[in-house]
Image: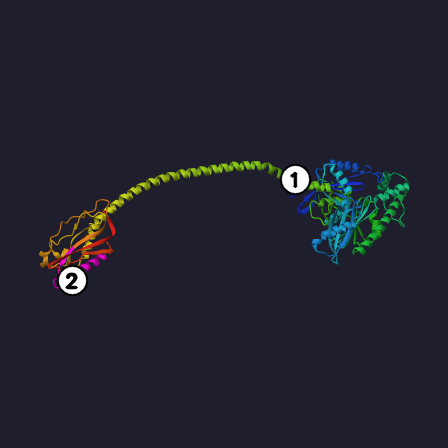
Amino acid sequence: MLGSERTLALDIGASTIKVGEFQAAKGQGLRLTNFNYAELGIDPEHEENRKALIVSTVRNVLRERNIKAKNVVFSVSGQSVFTRFVKLPPVDESKVAQIIQYEAQQNVPFPIDEVIWDYQLLGSNSQGELEVVLLAIKSDIIEELTEGVESCGLRTDIVDVAPMALYNSVRYNYGDIEGCTMVVDLGARTTNLLFLEQNRVFSRSIPIAGNAITQSIVSEFNVPFLEAEHMKKTHGFVALGGAYEEPENETQARVSKIIRNVMTRLHAEIARSINFYKGQQGGSLPARVLLSGGTSIIPYTDRFFKEKIQTDIDYFNPFRNVEIDPQLSREELARCAHFFGEVVGLGLRKTTECPIEVNLLPKSARRREQMQQQRPYLAGAAVCLLLIPLCWLGYTQKTVALKTAELQELTDKVKNLNDVSQRLNREQSQLSEVQDKASQIASLVDQRSLWPELLQDLTSRLGSNIWIVSFAPDSDVPGAAASVAAPAPVAHPRILGRGGRGEDEESAPPPTSNSAPAGGGPGKNIAEIRIEGAGLHSADNPEQDIQLVDDFAKNLRESSFYDKTGVVIDVPPNPTLQGKTFTFTIRAKLLKPISM
């Protein structure tokens, strides 16, 4: 797909304005979409109105072909630019820029703050030295030229140098050539020489060109400059010299001799440049010469240089690898191709990578370019400043809405929790009531079973030949009021008396009434039991009575109902007793008081 952005290439020559409109082609190539050119028609001796004439001519060539591109890359002539090829010792890459800055201050013949300068690294030679080309132009010259170009409604992107643009054009169209190639660009004021060898380049400007021929005609015929220019174009050719017959037209013969004389002087300068390139730059003799520029089309120019330089001579074709729009006239393009080399080189600067990319853009244009680059950021910053209050307002509103929603959610949760809490309190209250009732019922159940268990435990701990007469809360303990009678051995003394003998049944004391404990009133505690018992007396061994009671007391101490230290024999058996039975009393302190 072809690039849609178009670039205008503008070559402002000494006598001709050339423009070309380009866009990117497939494979990073170049496509010519429009072109035009026009003669300035100005006398070099009277250039007071040169700037105004350039502006009007540029406007005309753009309007004639309806060229709409606004971004322009234009070139300045090599004569206006200080060019110096320098060699730097091998240094670290981080120090290259510093050394070049120093070399520029030493080589540029103007204060460095009064010029616009740039450089290009060309590579290293066989000695490892860095080859650099320095280019500088006076600031006021480039500022004035840029102002004139932009007054035509154009915007300057790059300011190139004509010989460097021509070099890029040659490299693009003749990338397959080998050996040393010399390009002779014969312009109006100067002849620019370019030596191309491998990746190296060397250029030199010679102040002998088309205007020198015209000035010689002016001197010879004593005519104005523009008339002499017309004579050169209509009658001029390079005289063949030697045995060739002169033309019959005397004017033509004189003009051709003038042209040959100037070309001979030019050849002498070219020969010196070749020797300088060989001796000082370590180059080779040119294997071929390419002619370019408006003056190069003077008839027999190629033959003259072939005779003098003794090498292949050809005309440079700047459109060799350039795609041409089908709508353009190829015949018209062929008539002006000889001076479009710089235009093609300028068009390459915006569409592909070039071997030499220098830019002598003036400070005013650089500042504007920087402002344009910063404009999106400045506009973005302004928009951000305007958006800050809106964003803050939106943030505040969003925060309020979120907090309100959170508050409502928390309020609903609190309300639900309060309802749950109230239900829990009611359930807890009901549970407490149920637990109280359950405790009362459990207490009643415990009390109901306590006395049978207590009586059963007491009966199980009786020894043989003793029985319980009664048990009751101790009368000295608060809450004790009535006795509790033990079951009497009504039917069989062994059942209630724990080992009593049958023949002694009549001698046992009568039992008391079988009544339930009635001592403690409601809400009182029973802490101690008074046990009254009896047993069969042993007349042969009175101490056996005491032993039986002691064993009974010991068994009570092992019970889980009584405190071990609280079981006391209060009334032991009487050792002097003469009857068949003996009595005793034991006070037993309960381990846990019994609530009544």
Q: Quadrant of residue 407?
A: top left
Q: Where residue 71 sits in the image (x, y, percent)?
A: 70, 40
Observer-nearest of 577 and 372:
577
Q: Earlier in the sequence, mark 1 or mark 2?
A: 1
The vertical placement of 552 against 30, above or below, is below
Q: Where residue 274 sits in the image (x, y, percent)?
A: 82, 53
Q: Which residues are magenta?
A: 533-557
- Circle 2 — which element? helix
Q: Where residue 354 sits in the image (x, y, percent)?
A: 71, 48
- In front: mark 1 or mark 2? 2
Amino acid under label 1?
Arg
Most extreme residue toward the front, as rendered?
576
Which disc is residue 375 wearing? 1
Residue at 50% across, 36% down: 400
Amino acid under label 2?
Gln
**Cα–Cα span, label 1 and label 2:** 127 Å
Which disc is residue 544 wearing? 2
